[in-house]
Image: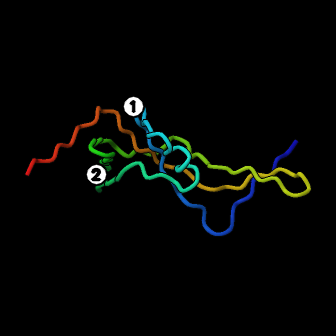
Amino acid sequence: MKIPIKKGEGDVPEWQLVELQGELELRQGDETRMREEGFEVGRCKGDAGKSVTLTVANHELVGNAAPLRKPLVVLERVVSDAGDVQFQVRGVLREKLAFVKPPRILVSKAE
């Protein structure tokens, strides 16, 4: 059985894969909000040397950007009114951000 894969309209966005060691825990109620509205995990900054910093709440993670050996494609399953199944390309992953060191805790000075 062949399943058609179609490119969506316009350019396909290029995304990055984020590789973390450990877990991100959501507060109660955040999971529902994340599905409905999207969810911002933190702020990510990079420089020309491929070093990347991710700040999540009061934690700072330092990592590196590296190309993937093989690009990955993000597909969305679409079922037509007639029941036909096809997949649309939603994004392409060519690079990963790897954070392998433990996070550094950011402490603000008391005033």
**Residue at x 52% of width, y 49% of height:** 34
Most distant residue in the front direction: 29
In percent of width and height, residue 88 lies at: 71, 55
In percent of width and height, residue 46 lies at: 31, 54
Earlier residue among tags 2 and 1: 1
Q: Residue 49 carries which label?
A: 2
Q: Quadrant of residue 102?
A: top left
Callout 2 touching callout 1 (CB < 8 Å): no
Most distant residue in the left direction: 111
Classify residue 48 as left or right of residue 95: left
Q: In which quarter of the image is residue 45?
A: bottom left
Given the image, on which type of amino acid does mark 2 rest? Gly
- According to the picture, the residue beneath numbered tag 1 turns out to be 21
Is 107 situated above or below 80? above
Q: Residue 37 carries which label?
A: none
**Residue at x 38% of width, y 46% of height:** 65
Given the image, on which type of amino acid does mark 1 rest? Gln
In percent of width and height, residue 91 lies at: 59, 55
Residue density around tag 2, few if under 14, some if 14–19, many if 20 or more, within 10 Å: few
